[in-house]
Image (spheres, coloured by chain):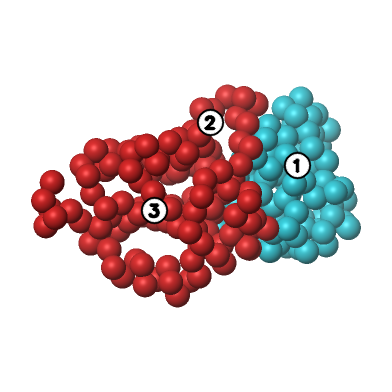
Chain colours: A red, B cyan
Amino acid sequence: MSEENIKKFMFVNRKAPYGTIYALESLEVVLITAAFDQDVSLVFMDDGVYQLKKGQQTKGIECKNFSPAYRALEGYDIEKLYVEKESMEARGLSEEDLLVDVTVLGRAEMGELMNQQDVVLSF
Amino acid sequence: MLHIINKSPLTNNSLDSCLRVAKSGGDILLIEDAVYAATSGSALEGKILEAMGRLNIYVLQPDLEARGLADRIITGIAPVDYGGFVDLTANNSNCQSWL
């Protein structure tokens, strides 16, 4: 695909997994977008950080554990994953608690990255 | 009385409202996204510790496990399974689901 047809897409994930369908739906749309060779960034802030928590075991609630899919994103050339530092810290989490490698950004850097996007989709 | 909370405490005020009006000695059960309130190290741990002095706080273990937080439960909060959920409902004369 020629350079001018590539847009910068950002997916902003702000909801915890399982309690609502947002996290799973976002993941589905992200995977679809990957098929169109776009420049995709994923942001996890507020309760969205919980989507990346290691050790999710969903047998007891009889829901599909979709957290392994975040580790598969690399295979779809989606490698830009960002976590807002303030959100992570407010939840007592650190990078070691997350199941994928991410770039941790402060709120100012996050705002800057958001400004650079062509399309921002919120979940 | 049993109070049931199912919303994340950091993005919704259900838990705050419940703690504001719940009478001492009551039971609070955290389920679904409210289980995040039962985990140590978060910004609202102090508020939970304060509430534990006057209320009995329970958390639904399968929901904690689903979210990868079974090893982060605040000491003193009692984990319950689905059977325990039923017992809490049966042993209280009434209950309020804070939607």
**Residue B66 image offset from top left, x and y in percent:** 62, 35
B85 in relation to A19, above or below = above
Kindly report the distance in space between the C-alpha atoms of the residues bearing marks 3 and 2: 22 Å
Residue drawn 84% across the image and 55% down it: B52
Relative to A82, B61 lies left or right: right
Res. A7 image quadrant: bottom left
> What kind of residue is marked 2?
Asn
Indicate which label's residue lies in the foreground, 1 or 3.
Answer: 3
Q: Which mark is residue B71?
A: 1
Host chain of mark 1: B
Q: Residue at x 75, y 29 (%)?
A: B81
Q: Chain of mark 2?
A: A
Q: Are marks 2 and 1 on the same chain?
A: no
> Judging from the image, what secondary structure is the residue with disc 2 in?
loop
Left or right: B44 with respect to B55?
left
Q: Chain of mark 3?
A: A
Is disc 3 in the same subunit as disc 2?
Answer: yes
Numbered label attached to residue A65: 2
Residue type at tag 3: Lys
> Mark 3 sits on what residue?
A80
Front-most of B57 and B73?
B73
- Quadrant of res B79: top right
**Considering depth in this image, is A13 or B16 the residue closer to the camera?**
A13
Disc 1 to disc 3, C-alpha distance? 29 Å
> Where residue A11 sits: x, y (%)?
35, 53
